[in-house]
Amino acid sequence: MKRVNFKKYHGIGNDFILIDLLESEFINMPLLNDPTYIKHLCNRRLGIGADGVIFILPPKNKGIAYMKIVNSDGSIPEMCGNGIRCLIKYLHEYRELSTKSPFIIETLAGNIESLITETKDIKVNMGTPIFDKNLIPTTLEANYKNIPYGQVMIEESLLNIYAVSMGNPHMVLYLETLSNLPISKWGALLEKDYRFPNKTNVHFVNIEDGKNICIKVWERGAGITEACGTGACAVLAVSSLLNLCEEKVKAKLPGGELIIHWPNNEGDIFMTGPAKFVFAGHFSI
């Protein structure tokens, strides 16, 4: 039996098991590629409980670390906005990460530049939203204001859907209210919509006003979560191009709030929010 230490963090309710392998003898352990064991760790009754596991690996290029994230169902997403803030918070608290200058975290979605603010929140450059349907990917054919667009009939409701990528695929749809939303049923159906060959994250959105957006999330590979950082960025990008909001908004999610900023509807989009330590422990394999 081998003992593996972990720390648990959450980013506005989106929670993760962090395993530091920067200098570990376990860097090649089978756990890294064992979806069954990941599901066990993330099980909220039989395991530690989390939306996913984050492995902190040595950088491959010019970053300070490489983030490998595995969803609670064992699938591997390209990026996770709340997850990367949790990783950065851990590095700041346990690896003495400097707050004086930006740094790079490497991910499957590319190199992500981040900064710890004076208030100890974490500001992340999430990159430029991608609307090229082949890169999202999606087969949605219509194009509205440069956004892949289509419709879906679900329980006798005809809904407009929009597609965008933040390094991972997102579907955005707008509702007059998020109250009594059958998110478990709708989210599970829409995640596997045939027009998203790699499946998709799904975001149900209500625009309060130009500066405040309410979002409920169904995450690809995790189901209902309290928040989604890449999703909040995706929602702002679509909403901004549709002239539904300003360039900087407060994204209100069940687990808390994020500040999302897309200057002038072009270039990179920025996410600022907290991450918090929950508890530490170990397990044996």
Image: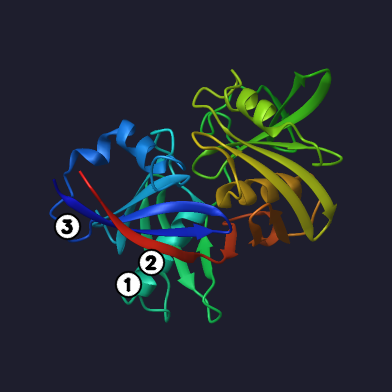
- Measuring 51% from the left and 33% from the top, which residue is drawn there? 135
Q: Position of residue 161 (x, y in %)?
A: 72, 30
Quadrant where the C terminus is found in the figure: top left
Above or below, 165 against 118 in this view is above
Which circle marks residue 90 in the picture? Answer: 2
- Which residue lies most toward the front here? 45
Q: Position of residue 42 (x, y in %)?
A: 41, 42
Residue carrying label 1: 94
Q: Residues under labels 1 and 2: Cα distance?
A: 6 Å
Residue carrying label 3: 24
Judging depth in this view, the residue of 39 and 94 nearest the camera is 39
Judging depth in this view, the residue of 246 and 144 nearest the camera is 246
Res 251 → quadrant = bottom right
At label 3, the amino acid type is Ser
At label 1, the amino acid type is Tyr
The scheme the figure's colours follow is: rainbow
